[in-house]
Image (cartoon, helix red, strand yellow):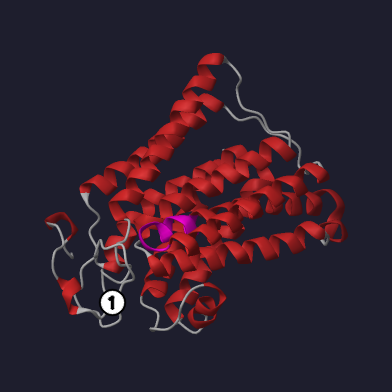
Amino acid sequence: MLPVVLAVCAAAFFAASTVVQHRSAATAPAGSATGVRLVLVLLRQPLWLAGLAFGLVGGALQAVAVSQGALLVVQPLLVTGLLMALPLSVLLEHRRPARAEWGWAVAVVAGLALFLTAARPGSGEDTAVEGALKTGVLVAVGTSALAAGLSTARGGRYRALLLGLGGGCALGAAGGLLKEVTGRLDGGGLASALSWPLLALALVGATGVVLNQSSYRVGVLTASQPAITIAEPVTAASLGAWAFGERLSDHPLAVALQVVGLALMVTAVIQLSRLTAGQDPAAAGGPTGGPTAGATAAGPHDPTDPRRAVGRPPEEELC
């Protein structure tokens, strides 16, 4: 029960961090671009640093949770942060998500609940099989790099989704590495923990942060957050099964329900991305604080363009 409580608390802090950092990244000064350059700009913004503090608290709670429970339990529970992030975005970004966005967000969490109920994840080892962990992390990092590369090639409507997918994969790998580091710390002390997984955790975690902040910069929260929300636990849970020996129920009915739950989550993510593709992240309150609207054009956005102040559907009006 303790890992579950800690995971939900971590999800709440991560949700607060996500909304605050999205607001900061979306309203960063013109010319901030994306990637490392964007993060260097954001490091000078108090609002973004407050979001970073929320994220560090969430990370600390996540570390305790994965040290006490299975990745297959802890990481999927972080999906609940999606439902927490939406109302927080209403308060901070002054953007009221459409009813359809709320509905698909609930569907994401419903799919998660079905998956966990059917899966009945079992705990594995405290530390991973080293070769399996390295392979799993390399696959996750490769997937993250591919998504980031495609975001540059495709651009436009689905750039935020692809960057969020890459960031989620990186953070999921970081979750697996975090469990390894805490397992080594408990089992062999500080000397055992100060090894390659700790360095890999720092590098992969930093990559995830950079990609996530870039996704916040180029799209509204519901364009990127669902992809992050799914990619992170799926990556971490895969590492849990592959490297840590964690297992799911293999009863035929349970497997069928797991597939349905995953399908529901993926479908909801796709629908959320379609609803928000191409919307301007600064639409809810750009650098000027004015009532600019979330455009749905596929091309590059200009938050200062007065033409974007019209055309928002009724359910997307500012609060």
Q: Is residue 183 visible?
A: yes
For this orientation, the residue located farthest to the top is 252
Residue pushed farthest front? 153
Secondary structure of the magenta portion, mostly?
Answer: helix
Residue 13 at least partly seen: no
> Looking at the image, how many numbered discs can be counted on the residues?
1
What residue is disc 1 on? 303
Percent x, y of residue 31: 42, 84
Q: Which x, y percent locates residue 128?
A: 78, 43
Task: Give the side of residue 71 with respect to residue 134, left or right.
Answer: left
Magenta span includes 158: yes
Examine the image and state in which quarter residue 277 appears: bottom left
Q: Position of residue 221 (x, y in %)?
A: 36, 60
Looking at the picture, tell me which residue is in the foreground, 149 or 113.
149
Q: Would residue 263 be found to the left or right of residue 283 on screen? A: right
Q: Residue at x 28, y 64 (%)?
A: 91
304 or 63: nearer the viewer: 304
Residue for point 75% across, 54% down: 181
- Nearer to me, 175 or 296: 296
Q: Which residues are magenta?
A: 155-164
Specify the quadrant of the image occupied by residue 46: bottom left
Q: Position of residue 245 (x, y in %)?
A: 73, 33
Residue kind at label 1, given as amino acid type: Pro
Where the C terminus falls, by quadrant? bottom left
